[in-house]
C-alpha cells in the first residue's frame, strides 16, 4: 500500500483490476483503493506476472502493507529491491506510534519534591561540586556557619573557610585515617547508648595460667559475649526498615591498634571455638593485622566486637561499634578496688575492670543490655565453662 | 512538452507505487505555456519556475535527471535531500529554486535583475510563473510593483488554470480578467490561449523581446484548465465537469499533435516515435537514478551556514 | 571630533561601498533623504546608483536582496524600524535563512534593524526582535552596544557570507560616542566581551541594556558589590564559553535584555548555563526582561515596562541575599 497523501494512514481495497496469473506492464494500475479523500490506483513497479494477492476487497490496510507479489525479471527485482534511491516512501511510512495506555499505576509514585528551594540546609550545585572536589561528605558542611538566607552556606562562605584553614599547618590524612573517619561517621548516625558494670578479673586470670598460649582478658570477654549472643541472637540483630536481621553465625571482632588507626579482625563462629585455642588464633590474627595480611574471612563481617583499652591506661570509655555491628564491649584497666565483704564485715581488695557495652538503642533497650551484661559476668565468673 | 508529460506521468506512477514520500505536483494541461517560457528565454537569462513548469524547465536546460533524483531521494539531487519536489534549481545557472510561499519568487527575480543592472550587465531578462491563486498574495503585489517601479526586464507568466487547489476564480479575484491588473501596475499585459502552443510561443516570445529591449515588466496571462489535481493525492472531484468540455479544457499536447498532423509537419509514425523516445528516455533515466545511492543522515553535516566558524552549537 | 553610534553605522557601509563594488543598499528613504535616521546620509551621492529608494514593500525588499545575492552582490537592506520586518518575515526566514541549506550557495545579505525603544515610540516603533530571528537556523544575529562594535560588527556582517540580522539600538544612536574608531579586527562576530570585571555576580546582557548594567554596577560598587558585566555582542551564535567563564568566577547569574521574556536571549543563556555549568551556580539563575506586554507609548509607562538601572540594582541585591 503506497503513501497516498500526506496524512493518509490507510486505505480500503475497492477492487482488483487484474487476476492472479495475469501478465502486467510497468505502471499498470492493478488495484483500486479508497482513502478518505479520493479513489486512487495502485500501480505495478515493473513488468511481469501477478504471483499472488494478500489483501481482500472492502478491507482497510495501513500504508506499507504488502498487498501482493509481482513475479518479475531478475534484473528488475534486483533493481527495485536494492536499497538505493527509490523507496523513501516506505521509510516515511515506517513511523508507527505505540498505543499509549494511561491506566494509573498505583505502585509508581514519584519521589517527593522538597518544599524549600532556598536557604537553610540547601547546598547549591556549586558548593556541592566544590566539596566533592575536596573529598568532603555532605554532613561536614553542617559544621560551617553560612551567611546565606536561612543560614545557607554560600560558595563564598566555603571559600572563606578554606582560606582560613590555609593559615594553619596541615598534613595529609592517611588512607587508614579516612577509612576510620568514614566508618565512625556512618556508625554514629544511629542512637547509641552505653551501659557498664565492674568485672572481677581473678577468675579468668587464674584460668588462663593453665593454658599454653594463654588468651588475653579480651578473648575471655569475647567468648562470653559470643556465648551470650548465641543464647539470644536478638542481642546482635540489625534493623532494615521494619525487619530485624538476625545473625547467621556468631562472628566477633577484636579491635587491634595499628599505625594511625584500628583494625578489627573477625573470629568466625566464636561461640563454638574452645577458649584454650583462642590464644594462638588471636596471636596469628594480630600479626596478620599489623602486616595487613588478614585472610579474607577475618577482614569483616563481625556482628559485635570487643576492645581492650586497659593496656592504654583507660579505666572507662564509651566505644563506638562498627557500622555493621549492633554492639561493642569495652574492657578497661584492671585495678584493685575495695569491695565490701559482708561475711567478714570489712572491705577486701578485688581486682576489677570496667566492662562497658555500647549498643544500638534502636535494637536493644536497657533491660536487654543489662541481661546481656549479667550473663557475661556470670560466664566470666566461671571460665571453665567457656 | 512530451518529455515533461511523460516524466511527470512516471513520477505520478512511482508515487502511486509508494516510491515517493510527500506530495507530487504535475503540470498536466500547462505544458504549452511553460515550454514557451523555457524556449523563448536564452541561456544567461533568469528563470524561476513554479509548480507546474516541468516543460519550461526542460526547455530552459534543466537536466531530466533532476526531477527523478529529487523525487526518488537520490544523493545526487540538486538539494541533496534537504528540499524536495518542485523546490529545485541551479541558482548560479539562472534557475532559481522556489519556496512554497506563492509570489515570493517575483521579488527575488526582480532583485537579481536589478543587481545585474547595477553590475552593468545588459541584454538579459528574468521570467517567473505564477497561477491564478498566487496573484492574490501580498508578495505578488510587492514584487510586481517593485519590478514596475524599477522598470526591470521581468516577464511574469500568469497561468489561469481556473482553480487554485479547490478554489475557483470566482472566489479568488474580483476583477474581470487577471490581465486587467497590468494597467494597475503600470506595465504591459497580454492574454493568450494556454492550450495553443503556437499562440504561446508567439506571445511569450513577444513579451520576452519587449522586456529585453527595455519595455519594463511584461505580464502574460494564459487561459487553460488544470487537467489534474492540485497534487496527486487530490482527486479534484470539485472541478466543474463542464470546463473539461470547453475549448479551454482541451489538452495542449493533443491539440499540438493534431495541428502537426494537419499541417503535415509530422506523420503519425513520427509522433509515435517521439512518444516512444520520450518513454525510453524517462525509463533509462529512472533506472539510472534507482541505482544511485540514497540520501543518508550519515552524509549530513547539518550546517545551515556557509561560515562554519559562526555555527551556533549547543548540546 | 567624535563619532556617535549612528555615525559608525553610516561609516561601516560607506567603507564597504568604497572597498567592494558588490555592496549596495536598497531600502526605503535611504537615497537622497539619507534614511529616516540619517544612517545613509550622503551615501547616495557618494555612490551613485548603489544606494536606492524602494517602495514600502518589506517583503519585496528582502526578496530582492536575496536575488541580488544570487547574482553575486553583497546587499544591505534597512528595515526602517525592526517592527516592520514582520512584513518581510517570510522572505527572511524561508527565503534568505534557508537558501544556503537548500542550494549550497551562500546568501551574503545584511538586514539592518533599527531596534529598541525610545520614550514615546510606542508598540510599533520600539521592538527588539533579536530572539525571534535567532530562533531560525541559517541566520546570524548581532546586537552591538558600543560605537566600536557597531562599526566592527557591521563591517563584518557585510563581509560574512550568510544573512546577518543587524540589530542596532535606536536609543544609542546619538547618546553613545567615542573619540575615534580603531582599526577593526574582523573577528568579533560570535564573541562576547567582559565589559566590566567583577567577582560577586555576572550580568549577561547585550545592546542598550549593557549601559544600564554598567551604571547599575557602578552604583553597586559603592556598597562593595562587584558585578561583572558580559556584553554578548552577537546573540547568534552565542558565546556561552565566555559566559561560563564568568560564572566560574562569580557563581551567580542575572541575564538582562530588552526583549520580551518568553523564549528570549535571556532564556537561552540560562538554559545553556543550567545545562553546561550547573556545578558553577551558587544560586538559581535569574532574568530581567521587558514586561510581557506590547511596548507602551507613554514615557513613564515605557520606563516602567523595560529593565532599568534601578530594577537591575534591586535584582542583584536580591540574588546576593540568596
Image (cartoon, rainbow, N blue to C red):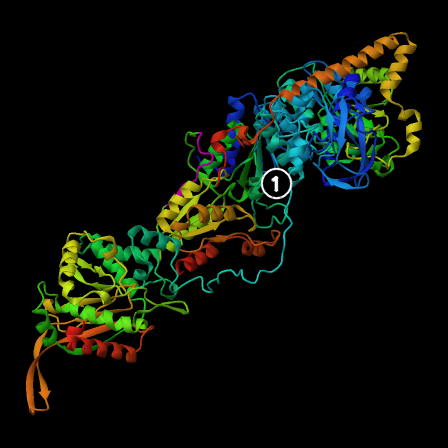
Mostly what secondary structure, the magenta segment? loop
Q: Which of B240 and C143 lies nearest the eye of the viewer?
A: B240
Residue B296 within the segment the image draws in magenta: no
Picture coordinates of residue C284 (x, y %)? 44, 55
Q: Which of A137 and A294 lies nearest the eye of the viewer?
A: A294
Camera sees residue C50: no
Camera sees residue B11: yes
Q: Is residue A154 left or right of residue B284?
A: left
Residue C131 vertical position relative to residue B207 in the rendered view, above or below: below
When asked about the image quadrant of residue A307, the answer is: bottom left
Picture coordinates of residue A155 (x, y %)? 34, 55
Residue C195 within the segment the image draws in magenta: yes
Q: Quadrant of the N terminus of chain A?
A: top right
Residue C169 vertical position relative to residue A128 in the rendered view, above or below: above
Q: Residues within 10 Å of mark 1 (few under 14, many from 20)?
A: many
When asked about the image quadrant of residue A192, the answer is: bottom left
Picture coordinates of residue B121 (x, y %)? 65, 15
Residue on which disc 1 sits: C81
Picture coordinates of residue A80 (x, y %)? 67, 24
Q: Secondary structure at mark 1?
A: loop
Q: Which of A212 and A46 lies nearest the eye of the viewer?
A: A212
Q: Residue at x 69, y 25 (%)?
A: B110
- What chain does mark 1 sit on? C
Q: Is residue B144 left or right of residue C13?
A: right
In this picture, which residue range is highlighted in magenta?
Answer: C186-196
Amino acid at each position: 500500500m503506497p503513501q497516498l497523501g500526506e496524512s493518509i494512514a490507510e486505505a480500503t481495497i475497492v477492487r482488483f483490476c487484474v487476476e492472479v496469473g495475469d501478465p502486467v506492464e510497468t505502471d499498470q494500475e492493478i488495484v483500486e483503493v479508497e482513502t478518505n479523500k479520493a479513489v486512487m490506483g495502485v500501480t505495478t513497479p515493473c513488468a511481469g506476472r501477478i504471483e499472488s494477492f494478500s489483501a481482500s476487497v472492502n478491507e482497510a490496510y495501513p500504508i506499507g502493507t504488502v498487498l501482493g507479489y509481482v513475479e518479475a525479471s531478475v534484473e528488475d527485482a534486483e533493481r527495485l529491491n536494492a536499497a538505493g534511491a527509490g523507496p523513501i516512501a516506505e521509510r516515511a511510512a515506517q513511523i508507527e506510534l505505540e498505543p499509549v495506555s494511561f491506566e494509573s499505576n498505583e505502585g509508581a509514585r514519584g519521589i517527593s519534591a522538597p518544599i524549600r528551594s532556598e536557604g537553610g540546609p540547601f547546598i547549591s550545585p556549586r558548593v556541592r561540586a566544590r566539596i566533592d572536589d575536596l573529598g568532603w561528605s555532605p554532613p561536614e558542611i553542617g559544621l560551617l556557619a553560612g551567611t546565606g538566607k536561612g543560614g545557607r552556606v554560600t560558595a563564598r562562605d566555603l571559600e572563606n573557610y578554606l582560606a582560613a584553614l590555609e593559615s594553619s599547618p596541615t598534613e595529609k590524612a592517611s588512607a587508614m585515617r579516612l577509612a576510620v573517619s568514614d566508618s565512625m561517621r556512618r556508625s554514629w548516625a544511629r542512637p547509641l547508648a552505653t551501659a557498664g558494670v565492674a568485672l572481677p578479673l581473678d577468675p579468668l586470670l587464674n584460668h588462663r595460667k593453665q593454658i599454653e598460649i594463654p588468651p588475653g582478658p579480651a578473648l575471655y570477654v569475647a567468648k562470653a559475649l559470643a556465648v551470650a549472643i548465641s543464647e539470644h541472637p536478638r542481642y546482635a540483630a540489625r534493623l532494615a526498615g521494619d525487619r530485624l536481621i538476625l545473625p547467621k553465625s556468631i562472628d566477633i571482632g577484636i579491635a587491634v591498634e595499628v599505625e594511625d588507626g584500628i583494625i578489627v579482625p573477625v573470629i568466625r563462629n566464636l561461640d563454638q571455638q574452645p577458649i584454650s585455642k583462642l590464644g594462638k588464633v588471636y596471636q596469628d590474627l594480630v600479626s596478620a593485622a599489623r602486616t595487613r595480611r588478614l585472610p579474607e574471612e577475618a577482614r569483616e563481617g563481625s556482628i559485635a566486637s570487643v576492645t581492650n583499652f586497659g593496656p592504654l591506661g583507660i579505666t572507662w570509655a564509651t566505644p563506638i561499634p562498627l557500622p555493621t555491628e549492633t554492639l561493642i564491649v569495652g574492657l578497661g584497666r584492671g585495678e584493685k578496688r575495695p569491695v565490701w565483704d559482708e561475711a567478714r564485715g570489712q572491705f577486701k581488695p578485688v581486682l576489677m575492670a570496667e566492662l562497658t557495652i555500647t549498643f544500638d538503642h534502636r535494637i536493644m533497650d536497657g533491660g536487654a543490655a543489662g541481661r546481656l551484661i549479667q550473663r557475661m559476668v556470670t560466664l566470666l565468673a566461671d571460665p571453665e565453662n567457656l | 512538452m512530451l518529455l515533461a508529460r511523460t516524466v511527470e506521468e512516471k513520477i505520478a506512477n512511482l508515487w502511486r507505487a509508494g516510491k515517493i514520500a510527500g506530495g507530487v505536483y504535475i503540470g498536466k494541461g500547462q505544458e504549452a505555456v511553460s515550454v514557451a517560457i523555457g524556449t523563448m528565454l536564452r541561456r544567461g537569462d533568469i528563470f524561476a519556475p513554479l509548480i507546474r513548469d516541468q516543460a519550461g524547465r526542460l526547455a530552459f536546460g534543466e537536466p531530466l535527471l533532476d526531477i527523478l533524483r529529487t523525487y526518488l531521494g537520490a544523493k545526487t539531487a540538486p538539494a541533496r535531500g534537504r528540499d524536495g519536489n518542485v523546490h529545485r534549481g541551479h541558482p548560479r545557472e539562472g534557475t532559481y529554486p522556489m519556496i512554497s510561499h506563492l509570489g515570493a519568487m517575483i521579488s527575488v527575480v526582480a532583485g537579481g535583475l536589478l543587481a545585474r543592472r547595477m553590475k552593468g550587465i545588459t541584454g538579459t531578462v528574468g521570467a517567473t510563473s505564477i497561477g491564478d491563486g498566487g496573484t492574490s498574495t501580498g508578495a505578488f503585489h510587492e514584487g510586481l510593483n517593485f519590478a514596475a517601479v524599477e522598470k526591470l526586464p521581468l516577464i511574469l507568466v500568469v497561468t489561469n488554470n481556473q482553480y487554485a487547489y479547490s478554489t475557483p476564480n470566482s472566489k479568488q479575484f474580483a476583477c474581470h480578467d487577471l490581465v486587467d491588473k497590468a494597467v494597475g501596475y503600470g506595465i504591459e499585459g497580454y492574454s493568450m490561449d494556454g492550450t495553443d502552443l503556437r499562440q504561446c510561443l508567439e506571445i511569450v516570445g513577444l513579451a520576452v523581446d519587449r522586456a529585453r529591449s527595455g519595455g519594463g515588466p511584461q505580464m502574460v496571462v494564459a487561459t487553460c484548465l488544470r487537467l489534474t489535481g492540485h497534487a496527486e493525492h487530490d482527486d479534484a472531484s470539485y472541478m466543474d465537469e463542464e470546463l473539461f468540455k470547453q475549448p479551454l479544457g482541451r489538452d495542449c499536447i493533443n491539440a499540438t499533435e493534431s495541428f502537426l498532423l494537419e499541417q503535415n509537419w509530422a506523420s503519425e509514425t513520427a509522433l509515435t516515435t517521439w512518444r516512444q523516445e520520450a518513454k525510453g528516455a524517462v525509463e533509462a533515466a529512472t533506472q539510472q537514478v534507482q541505482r544511485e545511492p540514497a540520501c543518508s543522515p550519515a552524509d549530513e553535516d547539518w550546517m545551515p551556514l556557509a561560515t562554519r566558524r559562526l555555527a551556533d552549537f549547543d548540546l | 571630533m567624535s563619532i556617535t553610534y549612528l555615525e559608525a553605522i553610516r561609516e561601516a557601509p560607506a567603507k564597504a561601498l568604497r572597498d567592494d563594488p558588490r555592496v549596495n543598499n536598497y531600502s526605503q528613504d535611504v537615497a537622497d533623504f539619507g534614511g529616516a535616521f540619517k544612517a545613509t546620509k550622503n551615501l547616495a551621492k557618494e555612490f551613485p546608483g548603489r544606494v536606492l529608494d524602494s517602495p514600502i514593500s518589506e517583503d519585496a525588499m528582502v526578496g530582492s536582496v536575496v536575488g541580488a545575492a544570487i547574482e553575486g552582490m553583497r546587499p544591505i537592506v534597512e528595515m526602517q524600524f525592526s517592527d516592520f520586518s514582520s512584513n518581510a518575515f517570510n522572505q527572511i526566514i524561508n527565503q534568505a535563512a534557508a537558501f544556503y541549506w537548500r542550494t549550497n550557495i551562500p546568501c551574503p545579505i545584511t538586514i539592518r534593524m533599527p531596534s529598541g525603544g525610545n520614550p514615546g515610540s510606542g508598540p510599533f516603533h520600539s521592538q527588539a526582535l533579536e530572539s525571534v530571528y535567532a530562533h531560525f537556523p541559517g541566520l546570524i544575529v548581532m546586537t552591538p552596544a558600543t560605537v566600536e562594535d557597531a562599526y566592527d560588527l557591521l563591517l563584518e556582517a557585510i563581509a560574512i557570507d550568510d544573512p546577518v540580522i543587524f540589530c542596532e539600538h535606536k536609543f544609542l544612536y546619538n547618546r553613545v560616542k567615542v573619540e575615534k574608531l580603531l582599526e577593526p579586527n574582523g573577528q568579533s562576530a560570535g564573541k562576547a566581551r567582559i565589559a566590566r570585571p567583577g567577582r560577586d555576580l555576572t550580568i549577561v546582557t547585550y545592546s542598550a541594556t549593557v549601559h544600564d548594567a554598567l551604571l547599575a554596577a557602578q552604583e553597586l560598587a559603592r556598597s562593595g558589590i562587584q558585578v561583572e558585566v558580559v556584553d554578548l555582542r552577537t546573540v547568534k551564535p552565542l558565546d556561552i564559553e565566555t559566559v561560563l567563564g564568568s560564572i566560574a568566577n562569580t557563581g551567580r547569574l542575572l541575564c538582562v535584555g530588552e526583549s520580551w521574556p518568553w523564549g528570549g536571549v535571556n532564556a537561552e543563556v540560562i538554559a545553556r548555563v543550567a545545562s553546561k555549568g550547573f556545578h558553577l551556580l551558587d544560586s538559581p539563575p535569574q532574568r530581567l526582561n521587558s514586561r510581557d506586554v506590547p511596548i507602551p507609548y507613554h514615557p513613564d509607562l515605557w520606563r516602567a515596562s523595560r529593565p532599568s538601572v534601578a530594577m537591575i540594582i534591586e535584582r542583584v541585591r536580591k540574588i546576593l541575599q540568596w
